[in-house]
Amino acid sequence: MALSVGRHPRGGRKAIGLAVMMAVGLSMFAGIAPSNAAGNGPMAQDPGPVGSFAWKGFNWQKRFWGGAPMYNGSWDANNVTAPDSNGYVKLGISNPTGNAPVGAELQSTRQGFGYGTYSTTVEKDISSLQKEAVWGCLFTYDPAAAPGYTEIDLCEASAWGGGAAYGQSWPVTQGHGYWFDATLPPAQGNNTVTFGVTSAPILTHRMVWEPGKLTFETYAGEGYSGPLLKRTVLEGSTVPVPAKEQIHFNLWVTGGGGGDPAHVAPESVTVRDFSFVPGIPLTAPTPTVSGTAAVGSTLTATPGTWTTGTTLSYQWFRSGTAISGATATTRVLAAADQGATLTVQVTGTQTGYATTTKESSPTATIAAGTLVAPVPTITGTTTVGSTLTANPGTWTSGAALTYQWYRSGVAVTGATAKTYTLVAADQANAMSVRVTGTKAGYTTVSRTSASTGPVS
């Protein structure tokens, strides 16, 4: 808010902040009906209470109460237009009598935005701004925040009256910065950087607010592909922390400097766009999946290196559909996975950052599993009337086993139990047993024991 030498804090802004609640509640008495112009887009999850109109996903209130920072305390809600067919909003300074200018202010009804990325596109040749006019271009403000009030200015512009005395000519400058304590004078209670303006008719401004750090950028033209006019990074313990700040745009007249505030001519600025993306982008690499793509094998998700302090959660997907309960870093492939491909999504969360989800590339098609299938052995006495027992060994857990006994290599009809009692027909023959294992999602496997000696 205080982006030039010798400028004093706007002490009257505390009254403005307190009037916000009144403004929202009293808008029905001010004759200001909500508007839904084209180009507003879907509403945010928290758009704020209904105000004068909805715009860019949020509700906004036109100012209709008096007070600072306008030097004469004169404001008019009619000096803010509702969004037009392009979704643009215009703020203006009027001067109906020629010696009593009237300002304009627009603010979000939502209180509390916090860390994230803020952006606005403004249509105005700032270099032509009258020296008494102040363009408060997107600033967050909380009148109740300690130690004084806090304010973050993304793109405020003015010549601040043109000079310390009448006839001087200070240039119009823009500023990036913030007030952390308005009870202190400029350069003590604020941290700001000013820079010159160009005659570019459109400017785009972006700000990333994160714990202990503010990054400001101002570009010529619409979007971020034009020339970067200024990039400012401010860091330290005085960077404001989120509270109940609101978003403001205002156009007003300063009584300071050497200007002639009473005779300011009508002035206007068009705001084409506003956006807010909550949180700070996390460092979020694409996860990878390792392991054999076969039923029974274990796949492992490797998330990569995320921003320090990030909490990670996992969700496995089967051909694009979330697998119920599959939320660990590993996935033991089940029969239902056969013939599908799997991916894993890793979601990172951390206070002050935007929740981010990254998904791995799909695995190869999941093949049938291979059963653990040892060669069976036979125990028992090889004499007629004795009982032989098949010992299958330890197969894959859950495998269903079946048995078939053989007499000198020929299957014995009906001999399909784990045990077999030798009969007269077995005499002089060698006996063996075949164990067959089956399990859903696995290839069926058979193993045959070694043959016994001749049955006596």
Image (tube, helix red, strand yellow):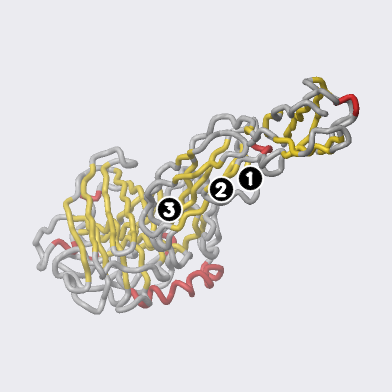
Name the residue carrying label 3: 277
Front of the two marks 1 and 3: 1
Q: CA distance from mark 1 to mark 3?
A: 30 Å
Judged left or right of residue 171, residue 120 is right
Name the residue carrying label 1: 323
Residue type, numbered disc 3: Val
Mark 1, other Cα within 10 Å: few <14 / some 14–19 / many ≥20:
some
N-terminal label among 1 and 2: 2
Identify whether 430 is placed above or below 193. Answer: above
User: Which residue is more in the foreground, 401 or 386?
Assistant: 386
The answer to the question of whether label 1 and label 2 lie on touching residues, with beta carbons closer than 8 A, is: yes
Mark 3, secondary structure of its residue: strand
Give how far across and how far down residue 402 sits, in percent: 79, 34
Give how far across and how far down residue 441 sits, in percent: 68, 34
Judged left or right of residue 297, residue 17 is left
Name the residue carrying label 2: 315
Q: CA distance from mark 2 to mark 3?
A: 25 Å
Q: Residue at x 35, y 74 (%)?
A: 67
Q: CA distance from mark 1 to mark 2?
A: 7 Å
Q: Residue at x 29, y 64 (%)?
A: 212
Give how far across and how far down residue 291 sits, in percent: 51, 38
What count of labels does the image hold? 3
| Residue 260 visible in the displayed image | yes
Mark 2, other Cα within 10 Å: few <14 / some 14–19 / many ≥20:
many
Judged left or right of residue 29, residue 153 is left
Q: Residue furthest front?
A: 456
Q: Residue at x 58, y 29 (%)?
A: 365
Mark 2, secondary structure of its residue: strand
Identify whether 167 is placed above or below 391. Answer: below
Mark 1, secondary structure of its residue: loop
N-terminal label among 1 and 3: 3
User: Which residue is more in the foreground, 151 or 123?
Assistant: 151
